[in-house]
Every structure is written in structure tokens, then in C-alpha cells.
């Protein structure tokens, strides 16, 4: 196995930790490197833990309504609606499992080690509950930020963005540690995560367009088919976004942490066990 280390400024070739002297280009090169090495593994993980649950929820959502007769309105089947809610909770947990598994896979492949779906999911299972809990708290903070103002929601989204790698590598309290890392160099963090968010936004709009067309044709007759079709397309759109977001957050985490103390992929590999 290749050994990578944090070297002097301007001379590091670590696959996950950017060169402190390279600026935005160093960060960008590491993100692209992660995508090139790990896109297949991440797509498979996302297909199992994110795309499949999305499809199930869309199907349950479509059958939770009873079709109207004449002038009657749509009504909800309570038990199916409850089942849909439970499925949503499970899907959120599986998404956390997938995120933890993805971080592990990225680290393994950065160190030149092979990755299998089974191994990734077994690791993810050990971190999933903690990641899930911290992500729920992060979502609550972001929602509170929305209630305050748009800037508040953006602030909390940035501050909580590193929860998953923090939990996976350090097993530390996700939100406090993410706040500490991002606030130590908040402008530096913004210069990485804001462009990443803009790319994700553009990608979501471009890929989501066919789903919007499908939704627009959903009348009484096509309601079920349209909702299922939209769910299927949403699952497909989630795959590349998962890859991009995971690559960006892992490299950003490694970048910020390396500015606290020397860091290498080899060290991250030892921590992700």
C-alpha cells in the first residue's frame, strides 16, 4: 500500500489532503481525483442506500391516495400514509449509512485499497446511527435558520456541512466539531463549499427538468404514473449529486483539519476502521 504524508508546504501529493500552498486549485484537484477514483463505488452505494428508498417512498406516496369519483376530492389512506412516513424515516437512516459508507470507500480507494459494497455497508452500519442523529439535528438548525432568514439557513448549512466526515473519522460530536473546523477559517470554507453548492444547484436544475415535465402532466388519470415516474427520476438525479457532495465535503474536511495539525490519507485510513 502506498504511504502518503503531510509534507512541507508546496510539496504534498496526498490524494485527499490538499497542498496548503496550492489554494483553490489544490482543493479542486483533490475533489476531481476522488471522483475519478471512486465514482463507481459511490454510485453503487448511492443506488442501494438512496435511490432505491426514494423509489419505494414515491410508490407508497402514490398509493396513499384514493382516486376521486365524480366531483369528490382525493383522500388519504391513513395506514398507507403512516407507512410512507415510516419509510421516510428508514430512508433517512439509510442515507446516513450510505454517506458513512461513501466516506470509507473514498478513503480506502485513495490509499489504493479495493472496495466492495458489502464491506462499505458493514462499515457504514457502525457509524450510521451517529451520522443520522447529527444530521437530524443539523436539519433542525438549518430549518430554524430558514425561519430567521435565508442567510441564517446558509450559515447553518455551511457550519454543519462536515458532520459526516467528523463522525466517521474522529467519532466526535458532529455539530460542535464541524462548527469548530468551519469557523476557524470561515472565509476559506466558503470559498470551497459555495462553488460546490452552486454546481450542485445547477446540476439539480438541469437533471431535474424531465421530472418537472412529468409532474406537470399529472391529472386525475395520470397521477399515480406521474408520481412514480417523478420518484424514479429523482432517484436517478440523486446519484451524481451524492458523488459530488461527498467528494467535496471529504476533501474540505481534510483541508481544514490539516491546517490544525499534520494529516495524511494514511492517518484517515487508520481512523476509518
Image: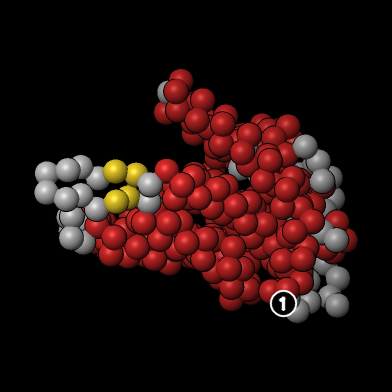
Q: Quadrant of residue 15?
A: bottom right
Residue occupying image coordinates x 76% and y 72%: 119
The N terminus - image quarter: bottom right
Determine if residue 178 is in view. no
Could you tell me residue 64's position as x and y percent? 37, 51
Instruction: Read off the residue under disc 1.
Output: 116
Residue 8, relative to residue 89: is it above or below? below
Question: Which of the pair 267/84 is nearer the observer?
Answer: 84
Could you tell me residue 135's position as x and y percent? 63, 42
Residue occupying image coordinates x 34% and y 63%: 228
Q: Residues within 10 Å of mark 1 (few under 14, many from 20)?
A: few
Residue 64, relative to residue 184: is it above or below? below
- Badge 1 element: loop
Question: Which of the pair 224/137 is nearer the observer?
Answer: 224
Could you tell me residue 75's position as x and y percent? 29, 43
Determine if residue 161 is in view. yes
Query: According to the image, what is the colour scheme of the structure?
Result: secondary structure
Residue occupying image coordinates x 61% and y 38%: 136
Could you tell me residue 24's position as x and y percent? 57, 52
How many numbered badges does the structure rendering display?
Answer: 1
In this rendering, would 38 be left or right of 196?
Answer: right
Amino acid at each position: 500500500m502506498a504511504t502518503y504524508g503531510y509534507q512541507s508546504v508546496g510539496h504534498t501529493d496526498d490524494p485527499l489532503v490538499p497542498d496548503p500552498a496550492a489554494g483553490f486549485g489544490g482543493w479542486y484537484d483533490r475533489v476531481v481525483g476522488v471522483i475519478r477514483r471512486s465514482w463507481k463505488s459511490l454510485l453503487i452505494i448511492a443506488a442501494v442506500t438512496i435511490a432505491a428508498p426514494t423509489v419505494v417512498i414515491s410508490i407508497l406516496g402514490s398509493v396513499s391516495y384514493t382516486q376521486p369519483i365524480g366531483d369528490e376530492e382525493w383522500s388519504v389512506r391513513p395506514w398507507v400514509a403512516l407507512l410512507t412516513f415510516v419509510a421516510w424515516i428508514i430512508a433517512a437512516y439509510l442515507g446516513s449509512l450510505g454517506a458513512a459508507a461513501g466516506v470509507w470507500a473514498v478513503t480506502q480507494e485513495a490509499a489504493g485499497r479495493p472496495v466492495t459494497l458489502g464491506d462499505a455497508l458493514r462499515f457504514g452500519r457502525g457509524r450510521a446511527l451517529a451520522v443520522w442523529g447529527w444530521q437530524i439535528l443539523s436539519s433542525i438548525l438549518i430549518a430554524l435558520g430558514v425561519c430567521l432568514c435565508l442567510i441564517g439557513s446558509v450559515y447553518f448549512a455551511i457550519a454543519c456541512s462536515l458532520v459526516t466526515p467528523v463522525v466517521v473519522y474522529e467519532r466526535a460530536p458532529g455539530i460542535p466539531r464541524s462548527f469548530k473546523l468551519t469557523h476557524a477559517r470561515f472565509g476559506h470554507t466558503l470559498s470551497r463549499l459555495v462553488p460546490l453548492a452552486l454546481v450542485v444547484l445547477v446540476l439539480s436544475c438541469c437533471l431535474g427538468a424531465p421530472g418537472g415535465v412529468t409532474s406537470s402532466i399529472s391529472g386525475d388519470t395520470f397521477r399515480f404514473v406521474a408520481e412514480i415516474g417523478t420518484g424514479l427520476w429523482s432517484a436517478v438525479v440523486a446519484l451524481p449529486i451524492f458523488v459530488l457532495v461527498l467528494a467535496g465535503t471529504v476533501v474540505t474536511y481534510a483541508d481544514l483539519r490539516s491546517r490544525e495539525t499534520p494529516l495524511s490519507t494514511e492517518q484517515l485510513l487508520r481512523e476509518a476502521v
